[in-house]
Image (cartoon, rainbow, N blue to C red):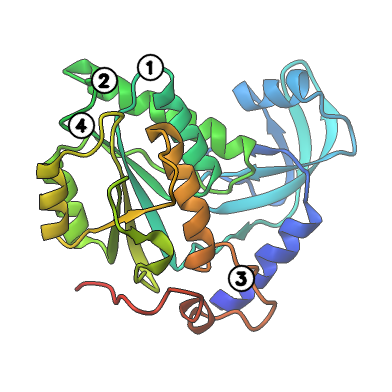
Amino acid sequence: MSAAANRATSAVNRDALAGAPFFQVADVPAPGLFTLDGPEGRHAATVRRMRVGEVLVLTDGAGRLASATVVAVGHGSVDVTVEPAWDESLPQVRVTLVQALPKGDRSELAVELATEAGVDAVVPWAASRCVARWVGDKADKGVRRWQLIAGQAAKQSRRSTVPPVRPLASTADVVRLIQSAAGALVLHEGGSVPIAQVPLPSSGSLLLVIGPEGGISPAELAVFTDAGGHVVRLGAEVLRTSTAAAVALGALGVLTGRWSAPKPDTATAEETAASPGAASLEPRP
């Protein structure tokens, strides 16, 4: 199936399944009878209280989905009849969030909101002004916790993909990410250029860098701009580090065409490239 046809199929299936709850499985099963058990089965049976005849969606968290109709409800599981699966097309521009470690519960809020807003990957960043510190085992635990939050938020927001959470990054790591990306935006309250006026890539990886509560240091800003990052602002208001990414992702969803509805039988990469602000920055080699 061509990319255009796949986008059209995804749109039709999504419309038909509007409101159906999502449940994550390791692998989307083949058409036929399937028992959804384990934590997801218990959630379907006891929390969602699914009933015979209701429709749900099974997804592997990597873009593959299938609709399924409940035929029986057990104690902690549901039996469903699975329809043929399909794959959702990935956006032409994929956004990776570099999120400086917020303090306290705001750490989880940042990941939750960014996932709901459509981020494609998350990189926790140990910025120089971070109050929170992931030292030793806390780094692995923090990544695992963020991955769990991303999975829960993806299911809640009915996403077919769960954004991966990468290992904790240093400032030097972020510099390398900027250098290898198709484009990079560094949000900063001192930025003079609005995000809507920055040239954006038409495809590839777009890096979005969010600083900590204390802000990005002058030294960090310098190395990020030297690496090719664009320092931008969202508006006159100063946002918290835990909410800035979600607001920026909303803007990028429009500016890059990520939120554009696919056109059946005619949606092409060329149309995506023609979206506002999309064509003026070419991907780096």
Q: Is residue 176 left or right of residue 34?
A: left
Q: Using a 10 Å C-alpha cutoff, classify the residue at mark 2 as few (fewer than 14 neighbours), some (14 to 19) or many (20 or more).
A: some
Report the disc number at residue 104: 1
Q: Mark 1 or mark 4: which comes first in sequence?
A: 1
Check disc 4 and report its element: helix, strand or loop: loop
Image quadrant assignment for residue 58: top right
| Circles 1 and 3: CB atoms closer than 8 Å | no
**Residue 97: horizontal and vertical position, in percent?**
35, 46
Up-down relation of residue 35 to residue 235 (above or below): above
Q: CA distance from mark 2 to mark 3?
A: 43 Å
Question: Vertically, is 15 above or below 124?
Answer: below
Residue 62 visible in rendering: no
Instruction: Residue 255: give its label.
Output: none
Left of 24 or right of it: where is 163?
A: left
Sequence-first disc among 3 and 4: 3
The residue to which callout 4 is attached is 126
Residue 125, image x, y percentages: 24, 36
Q: Amino acid at mark 3?
A: Asn
Furthest-front residue in this view: 236
Q: Are marks 2 and 3 in contact (CB under 8 Å)?
A: no
Q: Residues within 10 Å of mark 3 (few under 14, many from 20)?
A: some
Give the alpha-carbon distance from disc 1 to disc 3, as whole Å.
42 Å
Q: Which residue is mark 2?
A: 132
Q: Which residue appears at 22% of the width and 72% of the height?
A: 284
Q: Secondary structure under badge 1?
A: loop
Q: Looking at the image, is mark 2 or mark 4 earlier in the sequence?
A: 4
Quarter of image, res 72: top right
Q: Earlier in the sequence, mark 1 or mark 3?
A: 3
Q: What residue is shown with label 3?
A: 6
- Quadrant where the C terminus sits is bottom left
Residue 98 is situated, as x and y percent measured from the top left of the image, at 30, 43
Pointer 2 with pointer 1, Cβ within 8 A:
yes
